[in-house]
Amino acid sequence: NAGVTQTPKFQVLKTGQSMTLQCAQDMNHNSMYWYRQDPGMGLRLIYYSASEGTTDKGEVPNGYNVSRLNKREFSLRLESAAPSQTSVYFCASSGGTLHGYTFGSGTRLTVV
Amino acid sequence: QKEVEQNSGPLSVPEGAIASLNCTYSDRGSQSFFWYRQYSGKSPELIMFIYSNGDKEDGRFTAQLNKASQYVSLLIRDSQPSDSATYLCAVNKGAQKLVFGQGTRLTINP
């Protein structure tokens, strides 16, 4: 099915370890996003990419880096994981203002 | 003041009744507004969007927008147990960025 694919679905990291969350969309969308969701905090934007070759910081970018590898793929990297980065991470894509976002299934990350 | 505010609930509604979910936003220049439904452990899914003042209906769902009052709401008629979920209000901030409220947890009681 067309949509947004995220991997992995679950991950446990030790403090200081690094990892990359992968995201790919097959809807030919220009814009892609990474959000984190914490209880009582709603969805907060980490980074976004309005088009291939561009990336911008969102509300909570500290501790993260991103790469827009091509139009389909947008990855999120944690260089040195901290317990405060324990969260559920969602990738999303958008074909334009009128269409809202399509979300991936999420990655549940625990940092111990 | 948060950019997008929702009553976190929980909101409990009997089956068959109307559920009313509310959202206020701070940026008067916001142009488009979205309602997402999120079941526990799942990702958000878009159920409604609205751009113009007034009401927009889609099946049992009605979105209402009042830009002067900076207020957007979602009505669910004939509520069903399957409507039990968290409902997220989102506002477009330009550059296709959405700002989300913290969500309202809705429970429909059979």
Image (spheres, coloured by chain):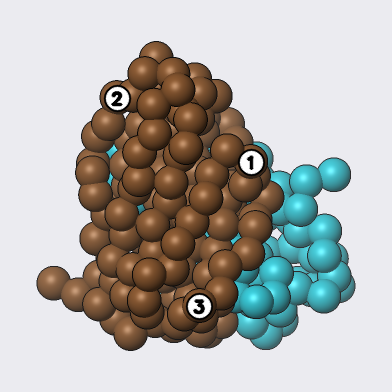
Q: Chain of mark 2?
A: A
Which disc is residue A12 wearing? 2
The colour applied to the residues of chain A in this rendering is brown
Q: Earlier in the sequence, mark 2 or mark 3?
A: 2
Question: Which chain is indicated by disc 3?
Answer: A
Q: Residue beneath label 3, please?
A: A53
Q: The N terminus of chain B lies in which quarter of the figure? A: top right
Q: Using the image as rendered, state which of residue B50 and residue A45 is in the foreground.
A: A45
Residue in the picture at 24% in, 49% down = A7
Q: Depth check: B39 or A49 in front?
A: A49
Residue B96 position, x and y percent, is 60, 75
The picture's colour for chain B is cyan
**Does residue B5 appear left or right of residue A46 in this picture?**
right
Q: Quadrant of residue B54?
A: bottom right
Q: Are marks 2 and 3 on the same chain?
A: yes
Residue B16: horizontal and vertical position, in percent?
36, 50
